[in-house]
Image (cartoon, grey):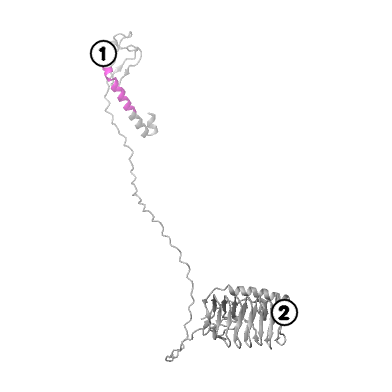
Amino acid sequence: MAYAAEAPVGLGTAGSYSVLGGETVTNTGPTRLNANLGVSPGSAVTGFPPGITTGAINAANAEALQAKSDLTIAYNDAAGRALTESVADDLVGRTLPAGVYKSTGPLALSGTLTLDAAGDPNAVFIFQVAETLITASASNVVLIGGAQACNVYWQVGSSATLGTNSTFKGTILALTSISVTTEAAVEGRALARNGAVTLDNNSFVTSSCTQTPVPTVTATPAPTTSAPAPVPTVTTPAPVPTVTTPAPVPTVTTPAPVPTVTIPAPVPTVTIPAPVPTVTIPAPVPTVKTPALVPGNDSGVGGAGGVSGQQPVVGADGARLGTNRGTNIQTAASAQPEAQSFLPVGLLTGAAVCALFAAAAGRGPRSARRH
């Protein structure tokens, strides 16, 4: 399991100082500092020597002014962090994990306070103290679980006092002043924004933190005791078949049903025979007996009507006919009614005879047609 830590407070250039005061810095005895010493806007630094520092002493110069500006930013940053837990009165006997702890009044430490990082070297502890912070003589702040003093911050709204022979861990960001009494040891910084910092035969070890990768704590499962696994039989694996991607199956479209066409039976051709001509057999032609002419005299009256000196004409019935122009009026008169009764029949009979003769003439030889 990984532990998330509060972000460290950014100190800027103020992080390079062991002691930084607003008005003055005063020292008694052989105080030892392993980082810079500065004051701003004040300029008085007294007691160095006998006090010593391995860093620079910056009094009312640009470096001190910049450090004082960065201190103000850091102070406000620490004061504005979100609360994890409220604390009050005395912190003695407490073991606190990383977080932000706020006191609305003065805060004291009369004994030992333990800060536990729980294995996270980047764990940050911030204490927001509204009024004063006072530690008793021989009081102690202990860091465990990988906690580092460079990640412990005490934002104090008034002044801070560290008791004699006490051991203190962390950076004090005080609004007014800081008093480090006789032989108190500090692993951290004493930074005062407006007032003085007073030292008395103290030792300061100031260091900066490097962000270390957060370790991941993983529970190791308990080993399981079991019978040894059987020795596997080594089998030559069967060759891996080549997987051939099948061709896409065409989409079969079912055609629309073809309508059944019923071919009608052929209609038989009816041959209408040509009309047989009606042959009308003509009625037998009656024999027309022409009455024999009565020969008249030369005057044509009452005689045979023959002409003297000519041969008589023989009729169809063998009668002799006169050749004279005259006719026997009596004979003609007596024969007229009979001729009139046969006239229509004669015409029809004549037409039929003509047709028969014409048909016979068509079938006969050419010589016959001449007759």
From the image, tell me which residue sits under label 2: 44
| Residue visible at 30% across and 17% down in the picture | 320
The residue beneath circle 1 is: 334
What crowding class fits label 2: few (fewer than 14 Cα within 10 Å), some (14-19), or many (20 or more)?
some
Residue farthest toward the right in the current orientation of the protein? 61
Q: Quadrant of residue 11?
A: bottom right
Q: Is residue 211 visible?
A: no
Residue 342: percent from left, percent from top = 27, 20
Question: Residue 88, which numbered label?
Answer: none
Q: Is residue 231 above or below residue 125?
A: below
Quadrant where the C terminus sits is top left
* Type of amino acid at the residue the image marks with label 2: Ala
Q: Is residue 263 magenta?
A: no
Write down the region rendered in magenta: 335-354
Q: Viewed as shown, does residue 269 lie left or right of 79?
A: left
Q: How far is mark 2 from mark 1, CA to CA?
A: 205 Å
Toward the viewer: 180 or 221? 180
Viewer-side residue, 37 vs 9: 37
Give the answer, above or below, for where 313 lies relative to 72.
above
Question: Would residue 126 be found to the left or right of residue 21 on screen?
Answer: left
Secondary structure under the numbered disc 1 in the rendered image: helix
- Marks 1 and 2: in contact by CB < 8 Å? no
Q: Position of residue 201 (x, y in %)?
A: 66, 88
Q: Quadrant of residue 276?
A: top left
